[in-house]
Amino acid sequence: MRHWWPTAMCVLALWLGGWLPPATAQALHVEVLLTDGELDGPPASAPVLTRAEAAQPGDEVQLDVPRRDGHYWLRITSDRAFDAGQQPVLVLNGSHGLGAVTFYPPGAPPRVVREARAGGSPLLRRGWVLPLPHGWPEASVAYLQVSGDGSEPLRLRIAGTAELIHQQRNGARVGAATATAMLVMVLAMLGLWAMFRDVLYLGYAGYLACVVGYSLVLSGDAAEIPGLDGLVRGGATLRWGLVTLAVVLQLVFSLRFLELDRVLPRAAALVRVLLWLHAALLATLLLGRELVHGWYPVVGNTLLVTCAPLLLVVAALAWRRGAVYGGWFLLGWSPMVLVAALASAHQLGLLRAGWADAALPLLAVLESLVLAVALAHHAIARHRLALRAQDSLECDPLTGALDGGALERLLGSWYRRASFGRNSYGLLMLEIEDFDALRAQRGKVFGDAVLQQALARMRSLLRADDTIARIDGARFAIVSECRREDCEHLAERIGAGFARQPFRIDGREIAVGVSVGLVMSRRGESANELLQRAVHAMQQARERQALRAAFMPANATAG
């Protein structure tokens, strides 16, 4: 009885052996033959450069073939016979630089097969479908001539026609659902941009649009949608251009979304280096086109595999340093970035992760949904902040404008919470000239009336969403979310508005001048620093006005 354990193990092994296939049994064998020159037909004998095999029927055989001028011959054998009634086909996937391939099926004449996007079989949206009209008889050999210009591994498998049709229909459904969901989010981001005129929302909408365009081209649906057939005619240049542009927009989005200029300046510089590398790569593709197709996917995938984990590390560090939406970024981007890196590594032949391509559409929708929710949360917070500023009780009791403390807290809120993706804004610092002397001469009540009329005149010259506050005395501050050119025009308009028409107080007309200093916000700059720069700009403007006033009479006399 003490020997029952080894006996039972032997019986179990024999029983399992009846159910499991032998470890040495392979379904498909592929050998790459090393030949010299261009041959008109399969070589009778040639040394084997490399070989690979599939462990189970239906599994892919992956071959890492070095690039070369000319062609390679592949010798394909199978341990299993496939009857012609099963409608089997040999499926080839690989670099789009392969072009057309020449296939010698068992027992049938050779034929040239084009890639699906170049007019090949509609059974496969991407890749080559190599028909087997007589099936695969036992102990048969097939030959395949492929170009040596490919930059990705070759992958071959035997599948049934019904299986390919089923896969195509499922892929079309998933692609249509993915494109529809992401287009809805594109429209939502465009709506936020129209409301707030913030480049962040527009940039993210552009990223989503690139992903939608690439997914439609990749699935083959673009050729069937009116108006999008130009995406198909663009070929590999347009496809890879969409991918690279999406990466560029994603890096721009990450830079501003994570507030890297404020919380991690060195990491911001590193992200900018990656951004310019991808921008240079995109420019090279657009200028070189077909001349760079051979090496472009390798360089692009290598950069993606390199920067994807790095970006997640930067996001985690930014979150720890106080980036408000760093957690949202990690939640949305981590699965997407990791699977995209695995897909790139699979394309480069570094590892086997064929499932990554199939998982990307779903993860793209989840990622875009998470970040769209984060951006909507930011927009709501920003709108609430604006309403709070308008309805704030911390107002100057004399003029009704915000007081200096409220304005400083408002600027600080933009700096800490809502500044990660906003446009730069202008801060105008204004001060009524000679106000202290005027109030000393005419009295406090007269001076208060001047302040109230000054505020009314300034408000008449501002936009509805501009913010104005009385800092102290006769000094006011205006925050305007405009470009510098628009802010400069606003400053000129305010100066001209005061000079053009005098104030009328107690039946008297009083000429009131104003000194205006303008500064534009900078990323990573605190509210206190911004206010100090604005005061300095106003003082410089007052000095320039004093110099003009001093030299104006002399110039007029000389004239």
Image (cartoon, grey):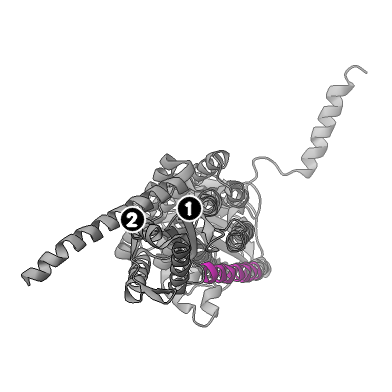
Q: Position of residue 557 (x, y in %)?
A: 9, 70
Mark 1 highlights which residue?
256
| Residue at (59, 69) in percent of width and height | 188
Local secondary structure at mark 1: helix
Left or right position of 233 against 22: left
Q: Quadrant of residue 284?
A: bottom left
Q: Is residue 246 magenta?
A: no
The residue at the far right in this view is 1
Q: Main secondary structure of the magenta part?
A: helix
Tag 2–tag 1 contact (CB < 8 Å): no
**Amino acid marked by disc 2:** Met
- Which residue in the structure is indicated by mark 2? 538
Outermost residue to the left: 558
Q: Nearer the viewer, residue 480 or 163?
A: 480
- Precedes in sequence: disc 2 or disc 1: 1
Q: Position of residue 554 (x, y in %)?
A: 11, 65
Q: Nearer the viewer, residue 162 or 370?
A: 370
| Residue type of the residue flagged with mark 1 | Arg
Magenta-drawn segment: 172-196
Residue 340 visible in the displayed image: yes
**Residue 316: quarter of image:** top right
Residue at 55% from the left image edge and 48% from the top image edge: 342
The answer, for residue 145, to whether it is visible in the render is no
Of residues 118 and 46, the one nearer the viewer is 118
